[in-house]
Image: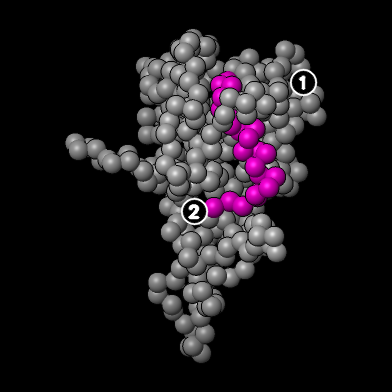
Amino acid sequence: MIRQYNIVTILRKEVLLSEQKKRAPRNRTITLTTAEREQFKTHLVRLDGPAALAAITNKTICQDVFAVLQWLPSHSVDLLFADPPYNLSKSFNGRAFSELPPDQYEEWLDGWISELPRILKPTASVYICGDWRSSSAIHRVVEKYFIVRNRITWEREKGRGAKSNWKNSSEDIWFCTVSPDYTFNVDAVKLKRRVIAPYTTEKGEPKDWNESGNGRFRFTHPSNLWTDLTVPFWSMPENTDHPTQKPEKLLAKIILASSNEGDVVFDPFLGSGTTSVAAKKLNRRYIGVEIDEYYSCLAEKRLMQAEIDSTIQGYVEGLFWERNSLAKQKKPTKTRDNRKTNQLTLI
């Protein structure tokens, strides 16, 4: 078995990204001051033995995932979302993950995926992210331990593109379950889509669409091709300096479809906290593991902010909207003292 610490080179120079970069006045990227980092460090958990579920629920565990999985309680997780390092060389706040030969990367995947069945409930679902380089390896590993249900492909529209190749603008998410008995709330993840061709019945009534004051829309069932997501960037309030941060909207789709309120959502590669934040906003319990202290503290800051603002961009009043449809959505009103609330009104 190849352990994570054998393929992750620890660079001794720690970088406080928030204090190095000069930000534009309208940049909304979440950062940490030195004082905030010291504050949020006290919230983090470390395990040195078996942990009771209550001791790690709604916590961020700051450790190597390979050192933690053995201590997590058995059959305690309802939904697992994993966004592991893809098989390419990339730096994560001074920690470098180096590209491996395909067979060694597959062995690394197996090293932690093989530990998951013990901690998952019989009714649990599993989602694991990958790119075109790593997706086939993920498939080969997960089918040894789970029932593979589907492969979601989502459009990652970001970057300038390649000059001698097709632009890499998609990623995969493998959807698996532990058993044939699992949760899938299809009505919770329907997409509100603008109607381009408003067909009507013989009586002139809308056919499979509705008309309201802000346009014509239909509700469509979710497919395994997602084109309504926006990769977090500098003007989005959820953005951080994590290089592979996933959108809260992406996690909201998965959490709403494959868990119920009060369920436990687990992320073994938490990064800057998106899974835990989305779970909290959607009234789920969460457990996150992240090896990097700075990212763990960012996650804690975002969780604190979620207590004040529980909105998820692109998900409004129980509906998922298409990308670039902000003008058609509902926006928060303000209270008499001008503070934003979760009350929504038509714009």
The answer to whether 165 appears left or right of 241 in the picture is left
Residue range in magenta is 290-313
Q: What's the coloring here?
A: one colour
- Residue flagged by tag 2: what amino acid is it? Ser
Relative to 187, does residue 143 appear above or below in the rendering? above
- Residue flagged by tag 1: what amino acid is it? Ala
Q: Residues within 10 Å of mark 1 (few under 14, many from 20)?
A: some
Residue position for label 2: 223
- Which of discs 1 and 2 lies nearer the camera? The answer is 1
Residue position for label 1: 51
Determine the image quadrant of residue 96: top left
From the viewer's side, name the closer residue of 136 and 217: 217
Relative to 158, does residue 313 appear above or below in the rendering? below
Queried whether the magenta region covers residue 326, the answer comes back as no
Determine the image quadrant of residue 162: top left
The residue at 66%/56% (across/down) is 339
Queried whether the magenta region covers residue 295, the answer comes back as yes
Residue 163, position in %: x, y?
20, 38
Residue 143, position in %: x, y?
53, 30
Question: Could you tell me which secondary element the residue under label 1 belongs to?
Answer: loop
What is the distance, in whole Å, between disc 1 and disc 2 at their CAs? 38 Å
From the viewer's side, name the closer residue of 301 and 326: 301
Of labels 1 and 2, earlier in sequence is 1
The residue at 46%/62% (across/down) is 325
Residue 110, position in %: x, y?
53, 20
The residue at 45%/56% (across/down) is 323
The residue at 52%/15% (across/down) is 4
Residue 41, position in %: x, y?
66, 23
